[in-house]
Image: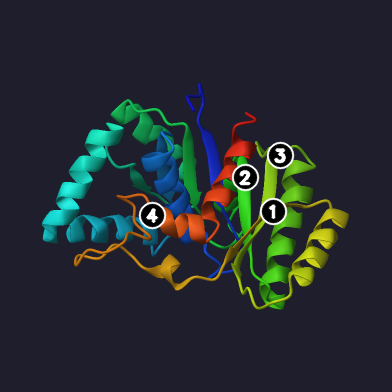
Amino acid sequence: MKKEKELLVAIASQKGGVGKSVFTVLLASVLHYRKDVRVAVVDCDSPQHSIALMRERDMENVMKNDDLKVNLYRQYERIRKPAYPVIKSDPEKGVEDLRRYMDEKGETFDIVLFDLPGTLRSEGVVHTVAAMDYIFVPLKADNIVMQSSLQFTKVLEEELIAKGNCNLKGIRLFWNMVDRRERTALYDIYQQGFSLLGLDCLQTRIPMRSNFSKDLSATGGPVYRSTLFAPDAAFTKECGFNTFMDEIMSILKTE
């Protein structure tokens, strides 16, 4: 997937705890380490910068574990590229800092994923959001989350896309943290409602799994969430993440 110009993509929401940073890392790691896509991550979610901190923890854990060192070396031998960069930035300077990094390092990317704060109140955040090519908005079957997510999406549609004030080519909703005990018909009704509102939603529904919150461990074991390794293949298949990735790639490859 080699492009003349990189695609700028964000997993964005006004609500915390819906998986923005988790899915940013999972997408980046699968794309970079498994799909032969050149990836960078810009961590604009200040002041916590959770993805930049995750990279630091990942490096510390690798240094403590010889097996992880060997696995990291073998991964490099297989894909012939280092770990994707995590560029720490602020909401208003994300794109600027990306360009500066690319100029200084002489690097190019296919896809750059942005981790953004959960608000559009700052003019700087709106400027960065408007520079994205695609935004994916995680949903959860919770009334407060749903109201906030739909409001967020409609604001982007009406204030940016409809008025031509942005680079956005599309916004896609997707279901996360789905409790499989809930009725499938409930989600089908939601899907119909999205269609009536003119909103697009991915077909794949990601179930609730505790492994999504498990970082790389210095004691070893399967990799679930890491900035240095792709997540466990059996896990991504079982939870539907592979199908989710196929949908994402089908959208991005239309470029």
Observer able to see residue 81: no
Q: Dot 3, crowdedness within 10 Å: few (<14), some or many (≥20)?
A: few
Where does the image place residue 244, in percent across and percent down from the top left? 58, 51
Helix, strand or loop under label 3: loop
User: Which of the two marks, 3 or 4, is nearer to us in this view?
Assistant: 4
Dot 3 or dot 2, earlier in sequence: 3
How many angstroms separate mark 4 from mark 1 (CA)?
Answer: 22 Å
Kindly identify the residue that appears in the image at 27 percent across and 31 percent down.
80
Where does the image place residue 143, in percent across and percent down from the top left? 72, 76
Which amino acid type is marked by label 4? Pro
| Mark 2, residue position | 247
The image shows a total of numbered marks equal to 4
Where does the image place residue 9, in percent across and percent down from the top left? 55, 43
Q: Dot 1, crowdedness within 10 Å: few (<14), some or many (≥20)?
A: few
How many angstroms separate mark 2 from mark 4 (CA)?
Answer: 18 Å
Dot 2 or dot 4, earlier in sequence: 4
Helix, strand or loop under label 2: helix
Q: Is residue 182 left or right of residue 158?
A: left
Looking at the image, do the residues carrying marks 2 and 1 touch, with CB atoms under 8 Å apart? Answer: yes
Kindly identify the residue that appears in the image at 82 percent across and 66 percent down.
189
Along the line of sight, the residue nearer the viewer: 153 or 90: 153
How many angstroms separate mark 2 from mark 1 (CA)?
Answer: 8 Å
Dot 3 or dot 4, earlier in sequence: 3
The quarter holding residue 208 reads bottom right
| Mark 3, residue position | 165
| Mark 1, residue position | 203
Kindly identify the residue that appears in the image at 62 percent across and 45 percent down.
247
Q: Which mark is residue 37?
A: none
Which amino acid type is marked by label 1? Gln
Q: Which mark is residue 231?
A: 4
Q: Is residue 4 left or right of residue 186?
A: left
Looking at the image, do the residues carrying marks 4 and 1 touch, with CB atoms under 8 Å apart? Answer: no
